[in-house]
């Protein structure tokens, strides 16, 4: 008996949150298309499998909570990197705490597994992993655990307005 791999269907976004992300990208002048999958893309491995790229090409969003400010700290990191909390803490100038699902949704407007690098509901500190610059295209979450969009690292830097940082755990 032959084994057939499932066909993964990528389609234009229909979820209201993913459509809002699409509108924000258009407003920012980023020419890309938010796409959705039937299967989840909430983890780097799931997203990479659905897209057909390497895990490293996923621009994952890791959310921390500033212990002093209470503000969200969103790190956009390469999917194959672990984020070093000490480095991030030094870059933002305060100790970090864990962000639970309720905090992530309240601070960003997105559920865990779908945090986009733009359109957060509350002001957030953003940091970007310099290792994302090694790719011509990266893929980021588009507001839901089933939606993503592609962009260049240069577009990501322009979109977020923050410099590249060393946030990788060595």
Image: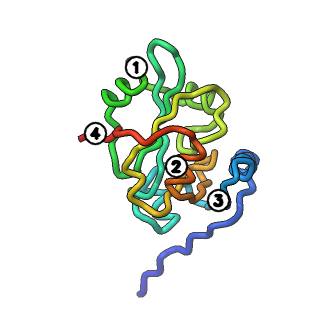
Furthest toward the top, the residue is 68
The residue carrying pointer 4 sits among few (fewer than 14), some (14 to 19) or many (20 or more) residues within 10 Å by Cα, namely few
Q: Are marks 1 and 3 in contact (CB under 8 Å)?
A: no
Taking the spot 70% from the left edge, 53% from the top edge, the residue there is: 29
Q: CA distance from mark 1 to mark 2?
A: 29 Å
Residue 169, disc? 4
Which residue, given by chain and number where applicable, does mark 3 sit on? Answer: 36
Which residue, given by chain and number where applicable, does mark 1 sit on? Answer: 93
Dot 1 or dot 4, earlier in sequence: 1
The residue carrying pointer 1 sits among few (fewer than 14), some (14 to 19) or many (20 or more) residues within 10 Å by Cα, namely few
Q: CA distance from mark 1 to mark 3?
A: 37 Å
In percent of width and height, residue 133 lies at: 42, 54
Figure quadrant of the C terminus: top left
Q: CA distance from mark 4 to mark 3?
A: 31 Å
Q: Are marks 1 and 2 in contact (CB under 8 Å)?
A: no
Taking the spot 43% from the left edge, 24% from the top edge, the residue there is: 92
């Amino acid at each position: 008996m032959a084994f057939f791999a499932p066909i993964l269907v990528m389609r234009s976004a229909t979820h209201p949150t993913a459509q809002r992300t699409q509108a924000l990208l258009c407003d920012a002048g980023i020419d890309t298309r938010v796409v959705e999958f039937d299967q989840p893309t909430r983890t780097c491995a799931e997203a990479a499998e659905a897209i057909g790229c390497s895990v490293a090409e996923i621009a994952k969003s890791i959310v921390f909570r500033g212990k002093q400010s209470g503000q969200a700290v969103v790190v956009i990191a390469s999917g194959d990197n672990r984020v070093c909390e000490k480095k991030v803490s030094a870059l933002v100038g305060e100790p970090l705490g864990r962000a639970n699902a309720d905090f992530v949704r309240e601070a960003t407007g997105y559920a865990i597994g779908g945090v986009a690098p733009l359109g957060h509901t509350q002001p957030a500190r953003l940091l970007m992993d310099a290792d994302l610059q090694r790719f011509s295209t990266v893929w980021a979450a588009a507001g839901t655990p089933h939606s993503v969009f592609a962009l260049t690292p240069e577009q990501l830097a322009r979109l977020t307005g923050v410099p590249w940082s060393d946030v990788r755990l060595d």
